[in-house]
Image: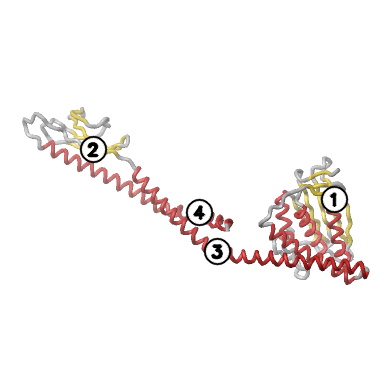
Amino acid sequence: MQKSSNVAFKFALLFSVVVILIVSIPLFFYASLAIKHTEFTQRQELIDQSFALKQKFYSIKEGTVNFVYPRSLLFGSAILDEHDHAIFSLVDFIPAMVEEEFVHFHNQLFYKTTLEENPLGARYLIVSKNFSYNVVLIDFLMLLGVVLVLIFVSSFWILRRSIEPFEKANRYMDTFFKDAMHELKTPLGIIQLNLEILREKLGSHKGFDRANAALKVLVTLFEDIEYFIKNQHIEYLPACTALSDFLHERIDYFSDIAQTKEISFERQIQEGVWVEINRMELQRILDNTFSNALKYTNPKKSIKTRLYYLDQEKKRVVLEVEDEGIGIKDTHAIFGRYYRGDNIRGGFGIGLSIVKNICEKYGIIISVRSHVGHGSVFSYTFPVTLAREGS
């Protein structure tokens, strides 16, 4: 639930950003027009104010001794003589201007106009007003924010609603597989136990060997699926593991399968090698490598297993499994989850996909060398941080 919400959130955010980038072009033109309109409105207000002041100046009668200069909370003004010297001023600063000109200076918009002959002896009138584009900018940002929020909320809601059916189906499938794996584990264990008991009582028989080999293949597949399901919910922590001993153990485990196909194991294993890796994840690497080698190796051939230090300092460990099978045409594609290399023998299933993910987790380098018709070599190089020498 939380994961799908995070996915929906990321996609909604990405979608919103893309839409905003597209919408920003017309919004930019809107902002430009708004700025021009605001400036035009402010200029018109200054012209209107100058006209009102002119009317008051022209209405002064000859011989008037006292004249109250008109003041305004919104506008500042000043009257100048013909030499641009201030006769009276309500502004702190008057920029250099020519007649009928607008000047924007220090968040102030100034307008200079010519006066006709008047009792004040004034030649020019300066009118000013506080002016900035902050209002336009705030409006633009508010509009942009509203659009962004609306797009994000709507896209997030749509994505969440779209994901819900798949999420529900995924939960059902997850529950089904967990229950199925739990139900299969017990009968598999019972079959394995009873086969061993029958072999002890009745002795070795090809039928028992084949049944036991088939069961081990099934168990390997079961453990792959179990790991694949659990890996989504459980964190597998690394631990010091005796690779040499564990390698012998897994080869012994697959010996029954090898015997039914008349395949032999050849071992060149450096003893006392330890690696720091989760035991179950190491088992997935070994089991899938051996399982695929057995599947594709021809009868009466051998599988060579080599474990050695790559350097004298014993800082890197290399594990190689070489088979004498049919070879692999595309060594890169085999790590895909459902790659099929041979229609008769089947594909590599999810096994090597799991191996690839585990190796990426621990920084293990995978190398596959193959010669079609002669066999393949799977090589795993464990990094310095994972290599340990046993006592």
Count how many numbered circles sit on residues in the image.
Answer: 4
Q: Pointer 3: what residue? A: 164
The residue at which mark 4 appears reads as 13
Q: Residue 257: x, y in percent?
A: 85, 65
Using the image, tell me which numbered label, if any, was put on residue 320: none
Specify the farthest residue to the left: 63
Q: Which of marks 1 and 4 is nearer the N terminus?
A: 4
Q: Is mark 2 on a helix, strand or loop?
A: loop
Residue 261 visible (yes or no): no
Instruction: Name the residue carrying label 2.
Output: 73
Q: Where is residue 132 in the image (x, y as percent from the top left)?
A: 32, 40
Amino acid identity at mark 1: Ser
The alpha-carbon separation of the residues under discs 2 and 4 comes to 46 Å
Q: Which of marks 3 and 2 is nearer the N terminus?
A: 2
User: Real-space Cα distance between discs 1 and 3?
Assistant: 48 Å
Q: Where is residue 386 in the image (x, y as percent from the top left)?
A: 76, 46
Quarter the N terminus occupies? bottom right
Q: Would residue 51 appear left or right of 138 to someone viewing this image?
A: left
Q: Which of marks 3 and 4 is in front?
A: 3
- Residue for point 84% across, 47% down: 273
Callout 4: 10 Å neighbours few (<14), some, many (20+)? Answer: some
Cα–Cα span, label 3 and label 2 = 60 Å
Please name the amino acid that badge 2 sits on.
Answer: Leu
**Residue 135, relative to residue 167: is it above or below?**
above
Q: Mark 1 points at which residue?
A: 244
Q: What element carries label 1?
A: helix
